[in-house]
């Protein structure tokens, strides 16, 4: 069963490898009853997001790339 492009959008994750400009970051996203790693980039193209930060997926490029932004009210 193929995942739709929008299925990850809006899901929360946690940064496991620094996300930022010029870096290929990594996030762990809770999806399909488990947690999976995705390559991650900052949604604004410039912010640096440190490991442990809670983020939300704003865009998903299949199969394993996401754009994320920090969740401030977590």
Image: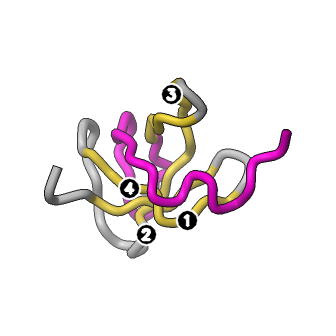
Residue on which disc 1 sits: 59
Instruction: Bin the neighbour count of mark 4 within 10 Å (Cα to Cα): few under 14, some 14-19, many 20 and up.
Output: many
> Which labelled disc corresponds to residue 43?
2
Residue 25 picture location, percent across and down: 45, 46
Give the alpha-carbon distance from disc 3 to disc 1, as whole Å. 18 Å
Marks 2 and 4: CB-CB under 8 Å? no
Marks 1 and 4: CB-CB under 8 Å? no
| Residue found at the far left of this picture | 73
Q: Residue at x 27, y 59 (%)?
A: 70
Residue 74 picture location, percent across and down: 17, 49
In this view of the protein, which residue sits in the foreground, 2 or 25?
Answer: 2
> Which labelled disc corresponds to residue 35?
3
Give the alpha-carbon distance from disc 2 to disc 4, as whole Å. 10 Å
Instruction: Bin the neighbour count of mark 2 within 10 Å (Cα to Cα): few under 14, some 14-19, many 20 and up.
Output: some
Give the quarter of the image for residue 56: bottom left
Q: In the figure, is residue 2 to the left or right of 34?
A: right
Q: In the figure, is residue 15 to the left or right of 32?
A: left
Quick one: label 3 or label 1, which is nearer the N terminus?
A: 3
> Which labelled disc corresponds to residue 56?
4
Residue 50 vertical placement versus 16 (above, below): below
């Amino acid at each position: 069963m193929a995942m739709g492009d929008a299925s990850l959008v809006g899901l929360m994750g946690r940064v496991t490898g620094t996300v930022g400009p010029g870096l290929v970051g990594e996030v762990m996203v809770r999806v399909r009853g488990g947690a999976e790693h995705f390559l991650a980039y900052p949604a604004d193209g410039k912010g640096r997001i440190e490991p442990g930060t809670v983020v939300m997926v704003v865009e998903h490029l299949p199969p394993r790339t996401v754009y994320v932004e920090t969740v401030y009210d977590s």
